[in-house]
Amino acid sequence: MTGRLARRSWEGTPGFRRLIPARPPRRAGSAVAVAGGPAHRARSAGPGPSGALLPDLVGMGLQSAQEAARGAGFANLISHDALGRGRREILDRSWRVCGQSPAPGRWARDSPVDLGAVRLGERSPADD
C-alpha cells in the first residue's frame, strides 16, 4: 500500500513513533516555562555518578549548544522554533538558542534537554 493508507497501517506497529511537537521538561515537580508546549519531566540527579552538570546554553548557536550538551553527557536533545512558527531547524548553524529546559544545573543524564531557538538575526521571545 502507498500514500495515506500505508501511513495509517504503520501507526499500530510496535516501535512506530509519531512525530509530535517537542515538549520542554520540568524540574523535579515544578513547571518550567519554555515556549513550545507543555512541560514534561526531567529528573534531578541524586547522589551518585548518574548526574551530569548541564551548562547554560542560552545565547549559543544551536549546533554549539547541542555539542556542549552531548559533551556534558546528555543524549536526549530536542529543539524547537521558539517563536512557535513550527519551522524545522534544518541547518543548526543558522539558529541561536534563546531558551533551555531544564535550567543549568545537575540533572540525570537521561533527562530530556529542550532547546528553544530562533534564526540568526531574529529577536527571541525573551527579548520582548
Image: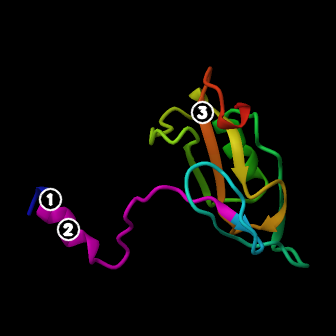
Residue on which disc 1 sits: 4
**29 sits to left or right of 85:** right
The span from disc 2 to disc 3 (Cα, nearest Å) is: 33 Å
* Coordinates of residue 26 in the picture (x, y in percent): 70, 66
**From what the image shows, is residue 108 above or below residue 73?**
below
For label 1, the crowd category at 10 Å Cα-Cα, with few meaning under 14, some 14 to 19 and many 20 or more, is few
* Coordinates of residue 4 in the picture (x, y in percent): 14, 59
Seen at 76% across and 34% down, the residue is: 59
* Coordinates of residue 9 in the picture (x, y in percent): 19, 71
Given this view, does label 2 or label 3 mark the residue nearer the observer?
3
Residue on which disc 2 sits: 8
Seen at 51% across and 38% down, the residue is: 89
State the image quarter where residue 10 is shown: bottom left
Residue type at mark 3 is Val
Residue on which disc 3 sits: 118
**From what the image shows, is residue 68 above or below residue 24?**
above
Bounds of the magenta span? 4-25
